[in-house]
Amino acid sequence: MSLQHALLGVLEARPMNGYELTRFFEAAPRWVWSAPHSQIYPTLRQMEQAGLIEGQQEIRGTKLRRMVYSITERGLEELRGWVSTGHSAPPVRDAFFLQALFFDMVDPEEAASVLRAYIEGQEKLIAEWRAHSQALLAKETDLLRERLKNRPPAEHDRIARLKAHVFDGQIAVAQARADWARESLRLLAGDA
Amino acid sequence: MSLQHALLGVLEARPMNGYELTRFFEAAPRWVWSAPHSQIYPTLRQMEQAGLIEGQQEIRGTKLRRMVYSITERGLEELRGWVSTGHSAPPVRDAFFLQALFFDMVDPEEAASVLRAYIEGQEKLIAEWRAHSQALLAKETDLLRERLKNRPPAEHDRIARLKAHVFDGQIAVAQARADWARESLRLLAGDA
């Protein structure tokens, strides 16, 4: 399950409690994997039972106790195994292309307005991912800074480049989608 | 739920029984929406209860009875309403980009082999979608032929172009992904 691997990957940077993890996934809905907190807590419990992470009570002041999770050796192995193995592609399920498949059934002006909103959404994602890619390249995100503390300095640039490149990939996909939507507008208008 | 809209869109072409619908979704895993038969039958029952489709017993020979579903006026309205409305983007959840985000943790040769398998998968999708796009443009798919029987001949070319264009969009996205994976190979090899 990919949420497990997303959590392992985040915890590899540094130990975090459930609340911090929830905030990370909420503050990063435009990361590569989003998850609601209703999924995060039960998944953490399962992962702890499976020995992939381990929880430790964190005592702050006299009362507040939180479970802080860190990745175990077994969790690291699971993450590395998953990352280095080819996985079959998920089933094709693209709600937007499904919608576009029936544009001939509606008023072209309505279809055009759906397309314009879609282009705007893709442009917004592109802007967010571009900012994130640049922050990674400059090694300026909190998580990357934590992560690099445990890596040889000679590798820092390479790691930052590899991570930034993932967001460049998401940008390229969103750009292809926005370009496609622009062509669709021309097609609907009868210009293509 | 998008499966409902996928089913409505297929049934708009012609009435079908559950078995034919299941075969359509199985034979078209590379369409825009795939669904296992375990989802199709219960969804058809819900849609019938909601008045979006209507079932009629089909009697073949003396014994074989199948329920043949056709789209109702209400189903058409639901489909048109969904198609002409902008919907919020689904949450970002890309298992492959998530995997790529941790390529720095594994042997570059293993990461490269994951990337090569991924490129191959995308190329295969591109070839299937290209064939489908060309068949649509030539009005040669069974479903499109059935669908066009109920549309004015003057619109046939436009409808075929709009539908083919959706698969051109899927091709453009897969191409962006394959190109990205090729750049990743160069980056892993230290050439970028």
Image (cartoon, coloured by chain):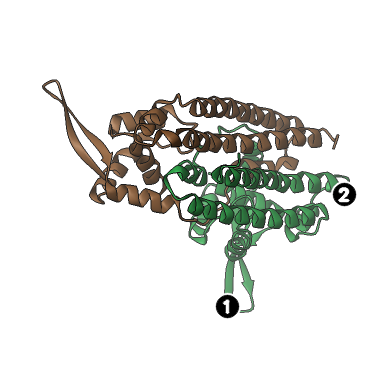
Chain colours: A brown, B green
10 Å crowding of disc 1: few (<14), some (14-19), many (20+): few
Q: Residue at (62%, 64%) from the top-left corner?
A: B20
**Residue under numbered circle 2:** B153
Disc 1 is attached to a residue of which chain?
Answer: B
- Report whether residue A90 is seen: no
- Residue ranking furthest to the left: A62
- B66, above or below A152, in the image: below
Q: Residue A56 carries which label?
A: none
Q: Is mark 2 on a helix, strand or loop?
A: helix
Mark nearer the N terminus (2 vs 1): 1
- Residue ranking furthest to the right: B154
Q: Is mark 1 on a helix, strand or loop?
A: loop
Q: Which amino acid does label 1 sit on?
A: Lys
* Relative horizontal placement of residue B12, taking residue A191 as reference (left or right): left
* Relative horizontal placement of residue A87, taking residue B132 as reference (left or right): left
Judging depth in this view, the residue of B87 and B175 nearest the camera is B175
- B17, above or below A91, in the image: below
Disc 2 is attached to a residue of which chain?
Answer: B
Q: Which amino acid does label 2 sit on?
A: Pro
- Report whether residue A20 is seen: yes
Judging depth in this view, the residue of A11 and A185 nearest the camera is A11
Q: Residue at (51%, 47%) from the top-left corner?
A: B96
* Relative horizontal placement of residue A152, taking residue B51 as reference (left or right): left
Across and down, in percent, residue B131 comes to: 75, 57
**Residue under numbered circle 1:** B63
Location of residue A54 (image quadrant): top left
Across and down, in percent, residue B34 comes to: 57, 54
- B179, above or below B142, in the image: above
